[in-house]
């Protein structure tokens, strides 16, 4: 073997890459002196793409397949122009293998709460997390924009940038969707698809494709969740009075089972259970159903004609005189002097305060009434 043959044997003759890492996006094949022998075999497996770089520029991209590096079937040779010494001479080039498989189960989450305006709770803060998947869709763009001249590029090298991009896009999609906080759980799938469509163009600038975006959970602040639990509890309780009776029955059962205190203690426990249950039921029922009479105000008597008017009216129904709020005084049936509330005799003329009667049916007439409320007969003028 001559010296020339010995030198030729040192050149690369087989170019291939077997990935056993599971997280490598790009791998630069180690070519000693960057010299590749003419006739070398290039093996590109499924989920791989080989990229040849010559003098700092991407010269050619090879999809999956088996290639022989010679002047007959490799377009890169005509681009490089490295064969002026003959087909047995080596040429220099960098070979990058790009992993085009789908990288799954990558984590994302909101490091800080996301502010959201909700129709039920007003301003709320939400936290969310989930998973996403990516794949290299444009190897040339990926090398130019992300990997550069790195010999070994893994998912962790770009994961931080992708997470921040995802959180920003998710926050924007959450605000645009205007989904109520109580309805978020039933819209995870729709919100995930909406977020993925918004971020697809952003990922393309890295030469990547966002193949999956999954929302696993969106959580509310602790205080909001506590308020929701209370509201749910009240809905489960339903009738408060029946719930109080049920609680009293439980107390009676516990007292009956407690035999250590003797018969007197048992009787006292039963009596206390009845009393507490009835008191709770009565108090809660009164609080939820106030009596109608409690909110009614006493009627107002007109100071001019003495007619009785409802508390809400501002003018007398009989004579039209303006009524003073809270006025409860009446006038004498004989001299029209003002009387103290409940007075039976006039302090001015001593007349007994009896309502006049209808001359026909003898029904009592209100002071100043012009017609009988029973038979309609015109009242006699005093």
Image (cartoon, rainbow, N blue to C red):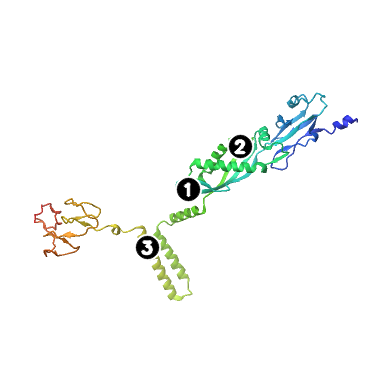
Q: Are marks 1 and 2 in contact (CB under 8 Å)?
A: no
Q: Residue at x 47, y 45 (%)?
A: 117
Q: CA distance from mark 1 to mark 2?
A: 31 Å
Image side of residue 47 versus residue 288, left or right = right
Residue 216 is situated, as x and y percent measured from the top left of the image, at: 57, 46
Residue 35 is situated, as x and y percent measured from the top left of the image, at: 80, 32
Q: Nearer the viewer, mark 2 or mark 3?
A: 2
Q: CA distance from mark 2 to mark 3?
A: 63 Å
Above or below, 57 relative to 174: above
- Badge 1 element: strand
Q: Residue at x 42, y 65 (%)?
A: 248
* Classed neighbour count for the residue bearing mark 2: other residues with Cα under 10 Å, few (<14), some (14–19), many (≥20): some
Residue to which mark 1 is pinned: 123
* Classed neighbour count for the residue bearing mark 3: other residues with Cα under 10 Å, few (<14), some (14–19), many (≥20): few
Q: Which mark is residue 283?
A: 3
Q: CA distance from mark 1 to mark 3?
A: 35 Å
Q: Which mark is residue 203?
A: 2
First of labels 1, 2 by sequence position: 1
Q: Nearer the viewer, mark 1 or mark 3?
A: 1
Q: Nearer the viewer, residue 377 or 224?
A: 224
Q: Nearer the viewer, residue 170 or 340?
A: 340
Which of the image's four quarters has the N terminus? top right
- Badge 2 element: helix
């Amino acid at each position: 073997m001559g010296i020339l043959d010995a030198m030729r044997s040192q050149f690369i003759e087989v170019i291939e890459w077997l990935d056993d890492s599971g997280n490598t996006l790009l791998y630069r094949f180690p070519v000693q002196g960057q010299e590749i022998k003419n006739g070398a075999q290039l093996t590109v497996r499924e989920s791989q793409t080989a990229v040849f770089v010559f003098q700092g520029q991407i010269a050619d991209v090879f999809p999956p397949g088996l290639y022989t590096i010679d002047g007959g079937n490799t377009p890169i040779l005509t681009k490089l122009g490295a064969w002026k010494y003959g087909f047995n001479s080596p040429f220099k080039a960098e070979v990058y293998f790009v992993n085009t498989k789908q990288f799954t189960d990558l984590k994302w989450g909101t490091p800080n709460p996301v502010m959201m305006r909700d129709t039920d709770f007003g301003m709320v803060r939400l936290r969310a997390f989930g998973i996403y998947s990516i794949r290299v869709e444009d190897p040339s763009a990926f090398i130019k924009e992300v990997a550069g001249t790195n010999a070994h590029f893994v998912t962790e090298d770009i994961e931080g940038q992708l997470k921040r991009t995802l959180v920003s896009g998710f926050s924007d999609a959450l605000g645009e969707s205007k989904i109520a906080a109580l309805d978020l759980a039933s819209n995870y799938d729709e919100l995930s698809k909406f977020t993925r469509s918004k971020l697809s163009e952003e990922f393309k600038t890295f030469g990547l494709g966002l193949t999956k975006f999954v929302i696993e959970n969106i959580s509310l602040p602790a205080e909001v969740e506590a308020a929701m639990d209370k509201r749910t509890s009240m809905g489960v309780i339903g009738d408060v009075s029946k719930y109080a009776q049920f609680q009293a029955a439980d107390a009676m059962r516990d007292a009956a089972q407690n035999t250590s205190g003797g018969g007197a203690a048992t009787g006292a426990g039963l009596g206390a259970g009845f009393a507490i249950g009835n008191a709770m039921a009565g108090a809660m029922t009164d609080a939820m159903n106030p009596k109608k009479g409690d909110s009614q105000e006493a009627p107002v008597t007109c100071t001019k004609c003495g007619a009785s008017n409802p508390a809400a009216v501002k003018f007398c129904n009989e004579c039209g005189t303006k009524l003073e709020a809270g006025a409860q005084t009446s006038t004498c049936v004989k001299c029209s002097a003002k009387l103290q509330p409940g007075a039976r005799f006039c302090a001015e003329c001593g007349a007994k305060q009896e309502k006049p009667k209808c001359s026909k049916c003898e029904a009592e007439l209100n002071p100043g009434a012009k017609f009988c409320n029973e038979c309609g007969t015109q009242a006699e003028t005093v």
